[in-house]
Amino acid sequence: MGGLREFTTSTAAAATTLNTVEPLRRTTLNRVFAAVYTCAISALLYHHAQALLLHNKTLLSFTISLSLLVADTVLAFMWITTQSFRMRPVHRREYPENLKKVTKRDEFPGLDVFICTADPYKEPPMGVVNTALSVMAYDYPTEKVSVYVSDDGGSILTLFALMEAAKFANHWLPFCRKNDVMERNPDAYFTSNQSWSYETENIKMMYESLKVRVGHVVETGKVSDEYITSDQEHEAFDKWTDRFTRQDHPTVIQVLLESRKDKDITGNYLPNLVYVSREKSKTSHHYFKAGALNALLRVSATMSNAPIVLTLDCDAYSNDPETPLRALCYISDPNILPNLAFVQFPQRFRGINKNDIYASENKCLYEINPLGHDGLRGPHYVGTGTFFRRRAFFGNPSTFIASEIVELSPDHAVEEPIKSQSILSLAHRVAGCNYENQTNWGSKIGFRYGSLSEDYFTGFRQHCEGWRSVFCNPERPAFYGDAPNNLLDLLHQNKRWAIGLLQVTFSKYSPVIFGIHSMGLMGLTYSHSAFWTSFSIPITVYAFLPQLALLNGVTIFPKVSEPLFFLYCFLFLGAYGQDFLEFVLEGGTFGKWWNDQRIWMIKGLSSYIFGLTEYLLMSLGISAFGFNVTSKVVGDELSKRYDQEIFEFGAPSPMFVPMTMAAILNFFSFSWGFSHIIRGVGDLQGLLLQMLLSGFVMVNCWPIYEAIVLRSDKGKLPAKVTIIATFLAWALYYIATSLIFK
């Protein structure tokens, strides 16, 4: 049941170096600093506890002491969880050139690629086309590659675009092989390639013609008869039309290319290309992306059943044709193979502006933290750029959990052609919306249900079962995707993640209990992500409480002359300093790091607060949530402002209100403190830390001040948000002054 039926290695070949692993040199420094910082945190918490128990005689002192204790306890817990992936970070390197010493090319294992899309207007079909073409053109035996596109939007626009892609692949794949093209996404290639030849110009004209046809269909919302050129296309569109004239919205599976039958213009076989729009019913839960992936897992099992599965977002195109070979450097290593579930590549993004104003790279999440995870049981599954062993979806490494029919087993060999009636009939059956009823799908096998963050939950469950993973981060990025280029999309995306993480946190599989019990130290890495929303507590406390106290002339932090003043300074500078050092050592810049910590604050006052609130309401049955696809569409004006590093607000979203309140309150508190310094009144030594904190928040809030006062473009902060935030900030000040600081 090993899953790699077609890929074996001899003892001699196993001795060939396919990969190496090396601990990072900063490991010892991390451990020493952790010991010192732990002592400092303990001293601060002891001070808060002592103040709360022994020195509180008024409502004011009790409220302040309790708030600071809770905030700093949360920060302490989150800091402790980060130490789990700072104890043994590692760097890996792979040697794909040595694969030929291990096995012959025609003995490589099969590769099934899963691409998910859900909305042709937020996820443009041309993006799906480019992603599909980039993996179809891998430097890998094409007859062993099958690309499955799940269209949960059930759109004829996406189906048409993929049909056009299948035609273009006849020319694109030979062109890439002949010219040793690295950017096998046509759009990326023609954007970056400046060389000219007759062949290049010809293929470019073909691609531009494809874009025009797809663009016209997307714009009009229908496929004109002039674009239907074959009986196969007529049949496919008839199926699609039939789907939406019936109440049950049945499954549509269309084999657009059949390997070992369809050939390109040079006579070489093309990969399989299969369009899948699974059955949907209002009476059956479809489990969002996890449900779509499980449908693909079953459909692909009936058609190709490759032992290796690559999951990709619809915009995450391949940037390196050797990527599957790099994954094989770990999958074929007998020392790693027995309990290896997946090889995770980092998410990288194209079009990021110079200083990444929205921290869209998520450098800590996608590059820095996985180095530490890799020194334990391996990186978390992040939803895309992941090569799975199919076997890892069926029980733990030592106990195989069989599926309900033998055809879905990872060791089942598909003997019939992919277009045979029996194969297509079974594929339609397993893609049905009621197929999973009374089965283990989503609970014990496949991608796991129960969270909007299906990637996090699936990887977590696999690690708990005893599987491990590997982080592969080559110098040339393996994949490039699209990141949100406006603030609201970013915040909604993070709110969705926050809700999904909370669903796991408060389930029977809570990482802090079940995870630590199952994995020990590795459980803390999952706990850190699971409790992201808890950052909203200290961020909210430190964004408002010291400032309200400052406006009332109340000192809540130690004076400059007191030892505790230096303790606060050490804790602040130590945490920020270590974060900055890691960021820069892994290729970041000061500008990107500054925006990364700024966005962390903004998320704490928006995504995390709203995600936590929505989850609590949902748990009480007061409201329900839906899955919102992050838009990949970029307008010209928005794109121009993004390139100029100007924050995009625009829409009057409630998400903007808390951060605007913080900006306004910190401005007035700092101004009040500064005016007292100028006039020489007040206790400067006692209020200095509060002044510094207000100033720090103000600097981070500069884009908000700019959007309120200095801008007139469409991306400025709506006046409605400013008015509401101003009123609420005044109300908060009035209530605090009347009830607490009186």
Image (tube, rainbow, N blue to C red):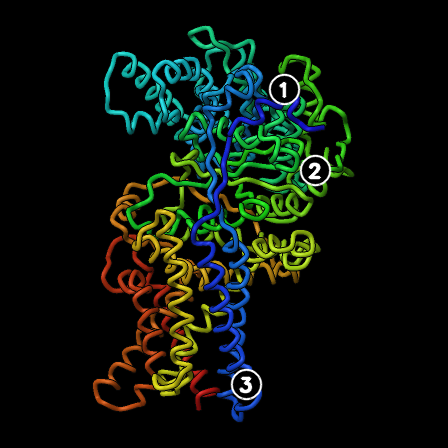
Which is more toward the observer, 549 or 97?
A: 97
Give the percent coordinates (x, y) of residue 353.
30, 46
Q: For numbered disc 3, what is the local secondary structure?
A: helix
Q: For numbered disc 1, what is the local secondary structure?
A: loop
Indicate which disc, 1 or 2, sits on the residue closer to the N terminus.
1
Residue positioned 49% across, 20% down in the render:
140
Residue positioned 66% across, 25% down in the render:
301
Query: Few, some or many C-alpha atoms within 10 Å of disc 1 (few <14, some 14-19, many ≥20)?
Result: few
Which is more toward the observer, 498 or 156?
A: 498
Query: Few, some or many C-alpha atoms within 10 Å of disc 3 (few <14, some 14-19, many ≥20)?
Result: few
Q: Is residue 557 above or below residue 512?
A: below
Q: Amino acid at mark 1?
A: Glu
* Distance Cα–Cα, label 3 vs label 2: 50 Å
Asked whether residue 240 appears in the rendered view, the answer is: no
- Asked if the residue at tag 3 contacts the one at tag 1, i.e. Cβ–Cβ closer than 8 Å, the answer is no
Give the quarter of the figure containing the N terminus.
top right
Give the percent coordinates (x, y) of residue 81.
55, 60
Quarter of image, res 196: top left
Give the percent coordinates (x, y) of residue 123.
45, 36
Q: Is residue 127 left or right of residue 389?
A: left
The residue at which mark 3 appears reads as 50
Q: Amino acid at mark 2?
A: Pro
Give the percent coordinates (x, y) of residue 424.
66, 19
* Distance Cα–Cα, label 1 vs label 2: 19 Å
Q: For numbered disc 2, what is the local secondary structure?
A: loop
* Distance Cα–Cα, label 1 vs label 3: 66 Å
Farthest residue, direction bottom: 57
The residue at which mark 2 appears reads as 397
Q: Is residue 590 above or below residue 241?
A: below
The residue at which mark 1 appears reads as 6
Residue positioned 65% across, 41% down in the render:
467
Residue positioned 54% across, 16% down in the render:
104
